[in-house]
Amino acid sequence: MSSSAASGAGDCYRELVRIVSLLPSTTEILFALGAGDEVVGVTFECDFPAEARTRRVVSSTALSPGLTPAEIDQEVWTRIAAGEELYRLDEGALRDLDPELVVTQDLCAVCAVDLSTVDAALSYLGCDGRVLTIDPSTLEEVMTSITVIGAATGRQQQAAAVTAKLRRRIDRVASVVTGRTRPRVAVMEWTDPPFSAGHWVPDMIRAAGGVSVLGRSGQRSERIDWPDVAAAHPDLIVVAPCGFHLSDACRLATDLLASGRLPPNVPVWAVDADSAFVRPGPRLVDGVEALAGICHPGVQPAVSDVSAYVGTTSANTNPSRSTTSPTATSSG
């Protein structure tokens, strides 16, 4: 989490009534803290809770619709290389809403409107709203971000209650997986080209009683080659494509399973990435519980609305197939 997030917390925000959230995760946090009535603007991706859909949309994607994962990857990096924005900020909506607090991030240009664009727009429009940046990189920092937003909105007690409940759920998972053999888990954040899942996902795997064999805690997701997946010797492969819910994740995982690119005899699962894996908010704990059900099905029940078993790779798959493009940082 950035230093500006910490400096933004304080009692001066107790009377705020107009908040614009430029991240689905912070929208979820604000509603979880009881500040939903103060949220007046959200992004086109803010779909939880359902009430968030009734707020004015202030940012939208610049990406073309209906693209395949490979086409999305290509357009993202083409736009970044050209210095083009991936998101469009509706300055007219910002002017109308005149927010007192704008919650955003400065961690990843692929995840939301660039912070410099937000600052420039507010300055141009003459808005006096404070910008609060929330940039967690680990599961613990996600918990801290809830506390920071609670302080920024005068809801410290609610934030303490929310984080305490989330920690109790994580502790319950720990109590049932402690002492059991930890499977080696490869979580893939993208399938074409392949990316490992970094940031808080390795922490989620550890909390669920597994061992992350691709991504690293607190580090950005990275582009990998298919032999890297085989070299990691996973016991389980979990497909968690950023920007996709469970049904589309199942489709992509099924395609990947049929491609013959994965190591042999490994169970493959799909998960609802947007709901419980890639958005750093309270529902990451749903992801921890789902992973625990995948890693330890005998002691932790499956979470059917978050995860689905797709199949097991055959004994004659060919994991030597490889992409040859250079390593890059993913959307995170």
Image (cartoon, rainbow, N blue to C red):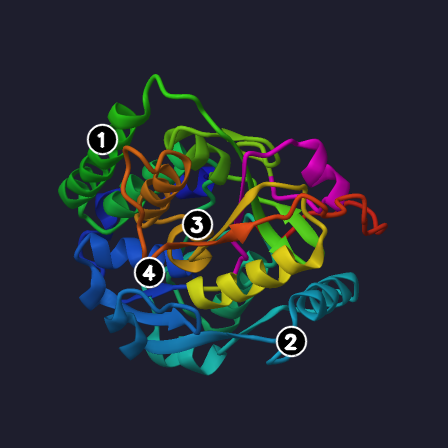
Q: Nearer the viewer, mark 4 or mark 2?
A: 2
Residue 277's mark? 3
Which stretch appears magenta? 220-242
N-terminal label among 2 and 1:
2
Residue found at x 37% / y 21%: 180
269 vs 27, nearest the viewer: 269
What amino acid is found at the position of numbered circle 1 in the picture? Arg
Q: Position of residue 230 (x, y in %)?
A: 70, 37
Q: Nearer the viewer, mark 4 or mark 3?
A: 3
Residue 67's mark? 2
Name the residue at the right extreme. Answer: 324
What amino acid is found at the position of numbered circle 2 in the picture? Leu
What amino acid is found at the position of numbered circle 4 in the picture? Thr
Indicate whether residue 229 is drawn in magenta.
yes
Q: What secondary structure is marked by label 2?
A: loop
Disc 4: CA contacts within 10 A as few (<14), some (14-19) or many (>=20):
many
Residue to which mark 1 is pinned:
172
Q: Is residue 24 above or below residue 314?
A: below
User: Badges 4 and 2: C-beta atoms under 8 Å apart?
Assistant: no
Disc 3: CA contacts within 10 A as few (<14), some (14-19) or many (>=20):
many
288 vs 98, nearest the viewer: 288
Disc 2 versus disc 1: distance between alpha carbons?
40 Å
What amino acid is found at the position of numbered circle 3 in the picture? Phe
Disc 2: CA contacts within 10 A as few (<14), some (14-19) or many (>=20):
few
